[in-house]
Amino acid sequence: MRLRDIGERALLKGLAPLGYPEGAPLPPGDDAGGVWVGEGAWLLKTDGFLYREVALKGMGPFEVGFRGVAATASDLLAKMARPLGFTLGLFLPEDLEVDFARRLVEGAAEAARRLGAFLLGGDTNRGPEVALTVSGFGPARAPLPRKALPGDLLYLAGDRWGRVGAAIRAHYQGRALEAFPLIREAAFYPLPRLELLALEGLLRGALDSSDGLAETLWQVSELGVRVDLEALPLHPDVLAFAGGEEEARALVLYGGEEFEAVLLVPPDRESEVLARAEGAGLPLFRAGRVGEGEGVYFRGEPVPRQGYTHF
Amino acid sequence: MRLRDIGERALLKGLAPLGYPEGAPLPPGDDAGGVWVGEGAWLLKTDGFLYREVALKGMGPFEVGFRGVAATASDLLAKMARPLGFTLGLFLPEDLEVDFARRLVEGAAEAARRLGAFLLGGDTNRGPEVALTVSGFGPARAPLPRKALPGDLLYLAGDRWGRVGAAIRAHYQGRALEAFPLIREAAFYPLPRLELLALEGLLRGALDSSDGLAETLWQVSELGVRVDLEALPLHPDVLAFAGGEEEARALVLYGGEEFEAVLLVPPDRESEVLARAEGAGLPLFRAGRVGEGEGVYFRGEPVPRQGYTHF
């Protein structure tokens, strides 16, 4: 049996429990792992990727380094951990320009800086192509698992929904993004949101969303619920880029690389969640709710499962 | 300017300060990075490598996974941090056998388990060849930098010196290791030493040694001292494998992958260090001392700088 035969999800599901601690702050396979230390948890997260698979047209090593720290930080923040530091593991061809490597690290350092965190070193190795692995750690007083109960409200945090999908489509269609500065910014500098920490203790669960919203919602469904989408955030620039509502919705559902969080909110906490989010400056969009059953639906219509997987 | 033109050391020296916190527990470029949290430090370390570059004849994915956690743990322990958890970032070809990936992770889990630690998840990505990046974290009450002052005694911790060098030579010469079980064990399962933590607060400085002892000692010299080796640990099996003292010394100096620590001991602490090491069961070998000046010498003769570098 080879990796391509079972796919990435099944592979990770089989590997995640190996060596994982019992009674850990988060179950194996969650967005980050961790251990209890004293009164709280310390979480550790690693995310790796090939340069060529994430570098959209117009992105350079600075943006890809930034993206690396963003991806890892997004997982930590969705689990209510404050990222304190990051390391970079780099595989680089030996004929690479030194300045390219430097710009990768500068972009990573900039993302860390904007999160109030630091780069704590790393490692360089010769490799056949440019590949990055970014690790990050931080404390979480109340680590938040992937969890959903029937009746919970479904909220989308942040404002990159649809925008990164648009940028990815522009890349493959060779379209320029000059007229869409927010789409470009969302794709090139997807800074995760420290403001999520303002919701500590209020949420049922949360998931980092980076392989497409539809895929993330299917993962919500796998927690044992049916997901009923009632609305999706359609930003004016995404609508303009897409040329229609249906096309814009597809960009929201099947984008990826947003590094935003999907939140499950108990109904009796909704008003407090909204108040705290507003106080912190965190954009929240109420997209629907979860109920008994399984599957993902948008206004009653099934949402197909399509997302990015590595094998 | 390309990476191969400047080499790995110069590259890392240029990259290490980027985004690194001021006043950190350890300076940029040390064996691990970290931040102060409350009364102590939390350290984070990442080490990456290509499977084919470390897999000696007879090693399989289990041993290479073990080696990955060992390499990262060794850095943390040399800095007096207790490793609590590790993550794996894996690049894997899509036609790889699933069982191969599983054995990699099982080996990593076994090394973590033997250190009283855990695997905390990770990430898998499609890549052109098998590559691993292992990250680890843990608290350090008194993080120990790379530091040496004239007059300090030079100690080698552990018993893998020369043995891993012998195993690497056996690999390239096609020699079997059946008659040398300790050499095989040192190379295949190089478990770092939790016992180092018994020396907390007593040492001047420490360095993880993984690119060859000579290279590590040259790095000691770069701290502003002259290194005078008076003796090297020559285990009977290494002498037998090498066929002579001079050849055995070369295996000690130019091995690599030992994942042992080089310790700088203030003379007035020597007896306490020895007592605590004996109590903890940590093998220590007094190899010499450091003084004013620069360079590395064995009984007055210069020791050439040769070691493994990636570019």
Image (cartoon, coloured by chain):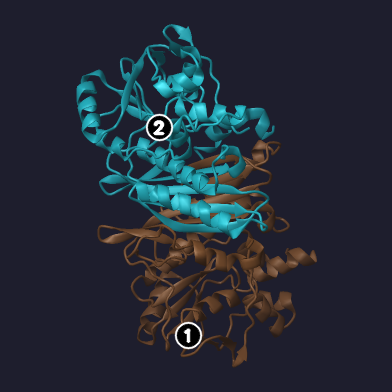
Chain colours: A brown, B cyan
Classify A44 as above or below B172: below
Where does residue A164 sit, x and y in percent of width and height? 64, 68
Where does residue A207 sit, x and y in percent of width and height? 48, 71
Residue A104 shows up from this direction: yes
Q: Which residue lies furthest to the right in this view?
A: A174
| SS for dot 2 | strand
Q: Which quadrant is the N terminus of chain B positioned in? A: top right
Residue on which the image places disc 1: A225
Pick the front one: A177 or A2: A2
Residue A87 shows up from this direction: no
* Residues packed near mark 2 inside 10 Å, few (<14), some (14 to 19) or many (20 plus): many
Q: Quadrant of residue B275?
A: top left
Residue type, label 1: Val
Q: Which mark is residue B260?
A: 2
Q: Which mark is residue A185?
A: none
Q: Which residue lies furthest to the front in this view?
A: B179
Where does residue B135 sit, x and y in percent of width and height? 46, 48
